[in-house]
Image (cartoon, rainbow, N blue to C red):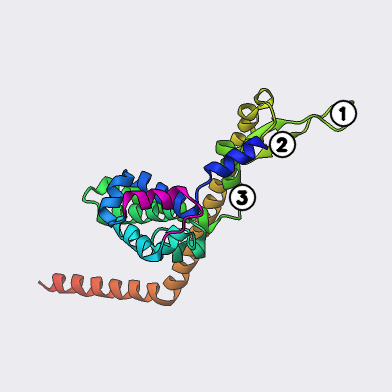
Amino acid sequence: MKNSQKEKKTELPIWGERINKLLKEKEMTQKTLAKKSGVAESTLSGWINNKKLHPDIEGLRKIAKAFGDIDVGYLLGDSECEKMNEEAVHRVTGLSDGAIRALEQVRKQAQTSQKEARRDKQGTKLEMLNYLIENIDENELLINMYYYLFGYFYLQEPANPDSPVIPFVKSKKPIEGLPQGILFGKELGQLYFIDIQEDLVEIRKNINAKNKKSEKQERIEYEKWYETEGRKLKEEDWDMEDALEAENDKK
């Protein structure tokens, strides 16, 4: 009960969370934000820390502008992205605003970087991301990567004490109440690493199969072209060569 009361005291309003997040991202203090926005520092502090004190729209507009034309809806929690154009992408794809900005930066560098090596590197990243997303349902690679990197695994006592099998609990975050002594994520995580390797091998097989199919299709198309147009062009080349040889013989 004490823990829940403590959490309620420290819980910030959505606009407070968002403003704090932006302050951290832009390495800005509340004092600097107050000066840039024209909102009194005491008022700004109250909006951030007091859930019952609601900011006015005009004040939020000033804060949004001070942060670099952030969408006011983001500060209020109506949208998940800082900019309106990013919100449209988020609603279609589910990508976070940070992921969208990172992709925009990679794409920009792939197109405009003055260093060819950097352009190629960023272009390769985009090509890989496109492949994984386009083929996202072909295997469990992303799920296995998630649990290998972020998963938590706990031993759990079996319902039947005589059971020889000890089941485990898989969670996306630590489970309160379970002692750290029964955490064995490192060992079980290795199993997910093996699954990742198997997924990568399977992806490679699929790519090779597609390449072979593509090569076979190219050969079929070439043979078809040769029968309809290529042979005729080749015969015309022979006729031209014969004509040139005849002219040279006359000379």
Q: Is residue 225 above or below residue 196?
A: below
Pick the quarter of the image with the N terminus: top right
Quarter assignment of residue 166: top right
Question: In the image, what residue occupies the spot 69% across and 25% down?
Answer: 182
Nearer to us: label 2 or label 3: 2
Residue under the image location 27 percent in, 57 percent down: 38
Mark 3, residue position? 139
The earlier-in-sequence mark between 2 and 3 is 3
Element assignment for label 2? strand
Q: Earlier in the sequence, mark 3 or mark 1?
A: 3
Camera-near label (3 vs 1) is: 1
In this rendered view, identify the residue nearer to me: 131 or 236.
131
Question: Which residue is the site of mark 1?
Answer: 163
Q: Position of residue 223 (x, y in %)?
A: 46, 68
Figure check: 79 above or below 132:
below
First in sequence, mark 1 or 2: give its number: 1
Asked whether, in this view, residue 12 is left or right of residue 157, the answer is left
Q: Residues within 10 Å of mark 1 (few under 14, many from 20)?
A: few
- x, y percent for residue 232: 37, 76
Q: Position of residue 110 (x, y in %)?
A: 31, 53
Task: Give whichever of 202, 56 is nearer the camera.
Answer: 56
The type of residue carrying mark 1 is Ser
> What residue is disc 2 on?
169
- Marks 3/1: CA distance? 33 Å
Q: Start and end of the magenta stretch?
A: 40-55
Q: Please, what secondary structure does the residue beneath circle 3 have? A: loop
Crowding near the residue tagged with mark 3, few <14, some 14–19, many ≥20 C-alpha atoms within 10 Å:
some
What's under tag 2, amino acid-wise? Val
In the image, 48: left or right of 160?
left
